Image (cartoon, helix red, strand yellow):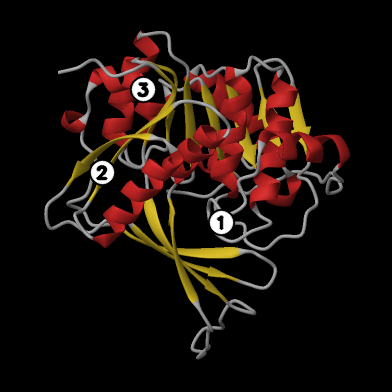
Amino acid sequence: MTKPSRVDLVGVGLNATDTLIALPNYPERGSKVEYSSATVLPGGQVATTVVACQRWGMTTRYVGILGDDPAAALHHGAFTQAGVEPQIITVSGGTSPQSLIMVDSGGERTVLCRRDPRVALKPEDLNREWIVNARALHVDGYDTEAATVAAGWARAAGIPVIADLDELYPGVEKLLEQVDYLIVSRDIPCRLIGEPDLEISLRQMQRRYGCCLTAATLGDNGVLAWNGSQFYQLSAYAVPVVDTTGAGDIFHAGFIYGLLQNWPLERQLDFACAAAALNCTASGARGGIQSVEAIEELMATGIRHAPAHIHCTAGSD
């Protein structure tokens, strides 16, 4: 087997075929609502992050799994067009991951997901050379055991691991022990730690798992991050929002781009906030990926949302 080329970023995780349905308002329970159009686009957490980094001039590899349906062809075409190296396992007769996304007039999205249990990435599907021939690894934790194995290989090879977590999957704590930069959805720290104060939760996450950084993305409130010695809170940029789909994925892409440029942490987070904001100005998970120059222009001239007091409520799992 030929040794894979060395890339800047390898991503191991989710892809999805997104069907976007624009609605004036989120439907009330029991209501009947008409819609005028539905648009099918490629998406998925890690897949979208990898594509964004490739568009910004990085070399990338995507490792994932698909069925053998038309959705798989859509993804292969998108990776080829972007220039991403795909390492994709195909499941004969399997249905590729699908998401139905309802987007209201304010751009807020509600996601319904469908996953074929046969289309699940397993540790034996991975090739260690795909992982260690990279400058950074990005995972989302959905196929948790495979992500944990990949993160362990990367950590042993001295490769930084970045994680995007929007759910507490079974066994995820073993993965978190292998993560250097843990950037999660708003409610995850409080649910994971069982502590209603977000700052305390981020501190405890950082100590428990030994991460270099723990952070939570907060929508209009931007991001709150803890690096073991101080907090960084950056509000989101105020832009005309069309669709928030993929905002978190592009935030992670922006963070990874800055990390591999060796920028100071605050600049990494700021670039990530600006990249995510611009992505919200168009439809789809990848619809508003802008150039590095456009992102830096927003950083220089953009207006932010007013800072807000951050609080979350712990839940149970």
Compared to residue 288, the image places residue 152 above or below, namely above
Compared to residue 96, the image places residue 109 above or below, namely below
Q: Marks 2 and 3: in contact by CB < 8 Å?
A: no
The numbered dot on residue 65 is: 2
Q: Amino acid at mark 3?
A: Ala
Disc 2, SS:
strand
Q: Earlier in the sequence, mark 3 or mark 1?
A: 3
Disc 1, SS:
loop
The numbered dot on residue 245 is: 1
Image x and y of residue 87, in percent = 27, 34
Residue at figure coordinates x 46%, y 25% from the top left: 59
Image x and y of residue 61, in percent = 37, 30
Q: CA distance from mark 1 to mark 2?
A: 21 Å
Disc 3, SS:
helix
Decide if residue 202 is on the left or right side of residue 303: left
Q: Which residue in the protein does label 3 denote?
A: 151
Decide if residue 226 is on the left or right side of residue 67: right
Q: Amino acid at mark 2?
A: Ile
Image x and y of residue 43, in percent = 44, 52
Query: Is any atom of residue 96 visible in this view?
Result: yes
